[in-house]
Image: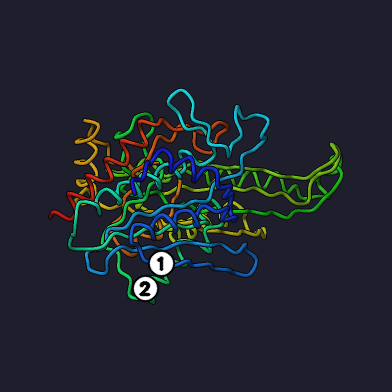
Amino acid sequence: MTLDPVEFTTDLIRCPSVTPAEGGALDLLQRTLEGLGFTCHRLPFSDEGTPDVDNLYARYGTAQPNFCFAGHTDVVPTGPVEEWTFDPFKAEVRDGMVIGRGATDMKGAIAAFAAATERYIGQGEFNGSISFLITGDEEGPAINGTKKMLDWLEENDEKMDMCVVGEPSNPNELGEMIKIGRRGSMNMILTVKGTQGHVAYPHLADNAAHLLVKMLDALTGTPLDEGNDHFQASSLQITSIDIGNPTENVIPGEAEARFNIRFNDMHTSDSLATWIRETLDRAAGGTDYDLRIRVSGESFVFAPGELSDLISDAAEKVVGRRPELSTTGGTSDARFIKNHCTVAEFGLISQTMHKVDERTRIDDIIKLSEIYLAMLEAYFRR
């Protein structure tokens, strides 16, 4: 069969796979890969308090090295459907664009994975394996997806040697950027308790809002760092301050703030947690407070080398542009894969991901497939 990456993109978009629903997307991908000769494993996982999630690991060949394409078929919700120009799951093809939820993030890349793999397999035998590590939980809690799949791979002696994640890495044009690492991310909820009272009698109360502001000022008063060769400066951002006070003449007895830190490899979540608590202790002056910390992922970077060169050479061959090596942006499942093999991210244009009328250029899907093919050709020719 001949797999058209654009047509396959539209087929995948028409599967309404909003996290955690599989929506038929993994079924479609499995049928397609089995038709190419892949051995497929469906890996559903569950965890108390989180939705059940279906996942797919597929492998062509049994020998090493194993080159892996990783990604996700789940998509974020559409938002108000009436704001879309077209049905978000119809996959409208118009004016050189494919429009629909997941076109950019990241069903277009998965279609490009598959089309490139089909063309490469059609060239004849090669020494090694190609695998697909595809989750349905990247846009959700990321508990029952890639992380547990990687545990399953280890338990079943499945080793990846190199991995490309198809996240939309390019800001404006295909071939602009490769993500060779990511900042870490941690989320904090800070709750301060005081004593409620009348605003006219402040000596009889203890204003929790005043103390909270003082504590937040201590956290934001000094930059965490100035960045380094691979990373921009770490950033602490206050995302919410909640007093919950329905009236103007009551001193609040409790105040809460939420903040996030995106941090580079000059820190770890443990070192930052220690710094946060020490800073808050000094600012609080002995007043009790509650701090909850949730770590989404640690920072990591793979220095420029074989994988970044492989992607850069392929991009330059196809689009005539050598990508910048970057660690900008949010988190991705590469934060889990990094513990198992060298990983980098390269996919479509990021401008419309998660937006109304998410779209990708038809020509970009075709060229991305050609870049992935060039990567396979170069990797197994080594």
Binning the other alpha carbons within 10 Å of mark 1 as few (below 14), some (14 to 19) or many (20 upward) gives many
The reply to whether dot 2 and dot 1 touch (C-beta < 8 Å) is yes
Residue matched to label 1: 150
Q: Is residue 320 above or below residue 109?
A: above
Q: Is residue 277 in view?
A: no
Viewed as shown, does residue 315 lie left or right of 209? left
Asked if one can make out residue 253 in the rendered structure from this viewpoint, the answer is yes
Image coords of residue 242 (percent x, y): 71, 44
Q: Residues within 10 Å of mark 2 (few under 14, many from 20)?
A: few
Q: Residue type at mark 2?
A: Glu
Q: How many marks?
A: 2
Q: Residue at x 40, y 31 (%)?
A: 362
Could you say which quadrant of the image residue 370 lies in? top left
Q: Position of residue 67 (x, y in %)?
A: 27, 58
Q: Quadrant of residue 336?
A: bottom left
Q: Position of residue 75 (x, y in %)?
A: 54, 47
300 or 28: nearer the viewer: 28
Residue at screen point 43% across, 67% down: 41
- Outermost residue toward the front? 1
| Type of the residue with mark 1 | Leu
- Residue linked to disc 2: 154
Q: Which residue lies at the image location 59% right of the left edge and 69% below the top edge?
A: 47
* Above/below status of 108 relative to 164: above
Query: Among all residues in the image, which is located at the extreme left?
Result: 382
Q: Is residue 83 above or below residue 159?
A: above
Q: Is 93 or 375 nearer to us in this picture?
A: 93
Q: Residue 35's x, y, as percent? A: 38, 58
Which SS class for mark 1? helix
